[in-house]
Image: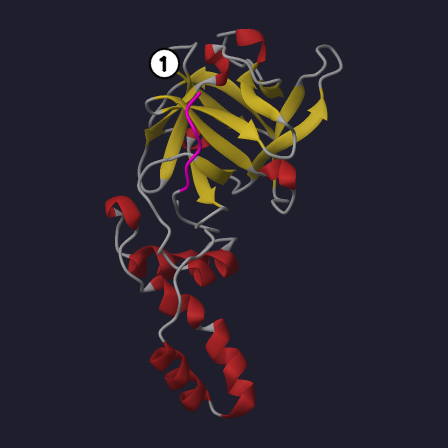
Amino acid sequence: MKGWGAACLMTVGTVGCGTTPLDSVVAEVMSSGGTDGGGQATGGSSATAGSGAAGAEGGSSGSGNGGSAGTEPNAGAAGSAGSDCQVTEPTPGRYQILDRVGNRCLQKGEPDPTLYPVFAAWLSGDCAVPEAEWELREINVDQYAIFNVGGDANLDVRAGLTNDGTPIVLYTPRPGKNQLFEFQHHEGAYFALMPQHAVGKCVEAIGAGAQLYPCNDTNRAQDFELVRVDCP
């Protein structure tokens, strides 16, 4: 297993690494006037951060991503983050994984009563829990084990099955290909998660969980967004 690294990632909810230029802050404070205006200037810093430099790894200009983030459910976090830590592809590090359709965090769920210590992989709007954080561990080039920080387990295709509808779960880390994933880039900042034991199959958001189905580039339920939470 290769060592861990740190890089920065993408889109809505990203933790920012940049700082707002002092002259911009002063200008906003002066224009809004008085001590009360200072709060407004701080709140408006999301727009300033959003106009930052292009993201790492050749990412697009921060002005587009930072500005549009204000319309999304996680607009507050995204606006304050700016774009200094956006990248165009996954790298080893710590992330949240959000589904595109529901904007929910993938996380550790309830134990499977039939196959302990298997746990369900849940999608929940509560992202402020350790079970909603994942470490990408690069095992082979561009192939990752996805380790749950709060659950001490890897994302796993249950029992290594390949049938459509097979549940995506969490299980004790092991070298099986059903715990090894590639990230296929889709439009914008979204990726498909492809387990390496099932060629042509992808993780798909189904209800409050996730299952295995044939990859479909136009199926938004197979689009997932990575949000970096350990930006250096």
Residue at x-position 49% and y-position 39%: 94
Q: Is residue 146 visible?
A: yes
Q: Residue furthest front?
A: 3
Residue at x-position 53% and y-position 40%: 102
Q: What secondary structure predominates along the stretch shown in magenta? A: loop
Disc 1 marks a residue whose amino acid type is Gly
- Tell me if residue 179 comes above or below residue 68 in the rendering: above
Left or right of 119 on screen, residue 104:
left
Which quadrant of the rendered structure holds the N terminus?
top left
Which residue is at the front of the view, 166 or 17?
17
- Tell me if residue 114 comes above or below residue 209 in the rendering: above
So how many labels did they put on this image?
A: 1
Q: Which residues are magenta?
A: 1-6
At numbered mark 1, what does the secondary structure look like: helix, strand or loop? loop
Where in the figure is residue 68, as x and y percent of width and height? 37, 58
- Tell me if residue 71 comes above or below residue 142 in the rendering: below
Where in the figure is residue 106, as x and y percent of width and height? 56, 34
Which residue is at the front of the view, 157 or 204?
157
Which residue is denoted by mark 1 in the rendering?
200
- Quarter where residue 7 is shown: top left
Left or right of 126 on screen, residue 140:
left
Q: Residue furthest left?
A: 58
Was residue 152 drawn as part of the magenta stretch in this picture?
A: no
